Image (spheres, grey):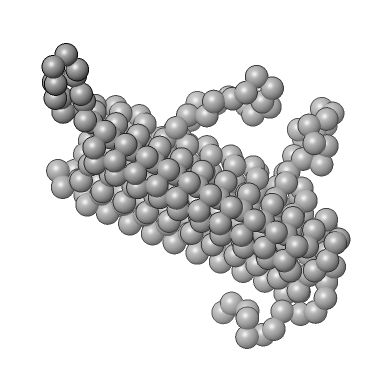
């Protein structure tokens, strides 16, 4: 289904909805939106202007999608990419989510309810995003990464591939994470490629850098600008270049058990 207007010799199509898409009757759809085959949009959703919803994408009830967002995109790999090409399932977004203007979310990812993906953020394929997560403006979440419930990732942080973030993690703006100690050299890097594991309640300060494979302990506090080169003990403030334990995290800052 599409809306067509003819002005002289110019044909204008204001939106396109594939006939096989399953869309609730109360869905609000903006101008020039494209909804491809077999997409499923539940009750109460609002779709902004120029949004592209790719084949098979699933939106839970009352989810809001900002203008120019792209949902269910398939990855385009560079000639030199080492990412294995696989058949991907649909992007699945739960109820009551908010997807910001210009956000890009790839196929094969699942997002639980009440999560916000802010303007210009990107979430790659095969990620699992928990409930009530905040992915801030301009954040990049690479492929095969999991993010636990109630985690907050602030503006322009870079979350590399093959990371695990537990529940209630806090990532401050401009944090950088890495997953390849060999920086593209040698074949053995493939077996050792791994991003950081960040345990429940850990907090990482602005502009901190996490090197490949480190584990940030439960309730660790990584000071701004630190470079984490090895595992951090739970419940400790860690700071410096390289980061070293400084003191325990104050009791009144710890999460309830």
Is residue 156 among what the camera can see? Answer: yes
Residue at screen point 78% across, 70% down: 238
Residue at screen point 75% across, 62% down: 225
Image spot of residue 208 (x, y percent): 72, 59
- Quadrant (top left/top right/bottom left/bottom right) for the C terminus: bottom right
Comparing 109 with 223, the one in front is: 223
Residue 69 is left or right of residue 80, and the answer is left
When the figure is inspected, residue 21 is found, relative to residue 27, above or below; the finding is above
Is residue 199 among what the camera can see? Answer: no
When the figure is inspected, residue 72 is found, relative to residue 61, above or below; the finding is above
Residue at screen point 46% across, 40% down: 104
When the figure is inspected, residue 185 is found, relative to residue 213, above or below; the finding is above
Q: Quadrant of residue 161?
A: top right
Comparing 61 with 71, the one in front is: 71
Task: Count every numbered label the image shows and give the total.
Answer: 0
Image spot of residue 229 (x, y percent): 83, 56
- Quadrant (top left/top right/bottom left/bottom right) for the N terminus: top left
Q: Residue furthest top?
A: 9
Q: Quadrant of residue 8?
A: top left
Comparing 24 with 154, the one in front is: 154
Q: Residue furthest front?
A: 8
Comparing 255 with 123, the one in front is: 123
Residue 35 is left or right of residue 157, and the answer is left
Residue at screen point 61% across, 53% down: 157
Image spot of residue 231 (x, y percent): 80, 60
Image spot of residue 22 (x, y percent): 22, 36
Residue 151 is left or right of residue 248, and the answer is left
């Amino acid at each position: 289904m599409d809306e067509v207007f003819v002005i002289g010799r110019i044909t204008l199509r204001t939106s396109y909805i594939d006939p096989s898409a399953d869309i609730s009757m109360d869905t609000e759809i903006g101008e020039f939106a494209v909804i491809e085959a077999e997409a499923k949009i539940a009750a109460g959703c609002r779709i902004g202007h120029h949004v592209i919803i790719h084949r098979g994408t699933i939106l839970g009830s009352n989810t809001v999608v900002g203008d120019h967002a792209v949902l269910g995109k398939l990855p385009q790999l560079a000639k030199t990419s080492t990412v294995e090409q696989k058949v991907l399932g649909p992007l699945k977004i739960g109820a009551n989510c908010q997807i910001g203007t210009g956000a890009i979310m790839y196929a094969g990812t699942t997002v639980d309810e009440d999560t916000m993906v802010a303007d210009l953020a990107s979430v790659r394929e095969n990620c699992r995003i928990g409930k009530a997560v905040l992915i801030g403006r301009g954040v990049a979440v690479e492929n095969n990464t999991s993010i636990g419930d109630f985690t907050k990732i602030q503006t322009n942080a870079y979350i590399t591939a093959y990371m695990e973030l537990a529940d209630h993690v806090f990532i401050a703006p401009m944090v950088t994470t890495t997953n390849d100690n060999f920086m593209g050299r040698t074949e053995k890097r493939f077996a050792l490629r791994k991003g950081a594991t960040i345990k429940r309640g850990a907090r990482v300060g602005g502009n901190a850098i996490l090197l490949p494979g480190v584990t940030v302990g439960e309730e660790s506090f990584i000071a701004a600008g630190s470079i984490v080169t090895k595992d951090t003990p739970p419940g400790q403030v860690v700071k410096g270049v390289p980061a070293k334990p400084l003191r325990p995290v104050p009791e009144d800052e710890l999460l309830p058990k």
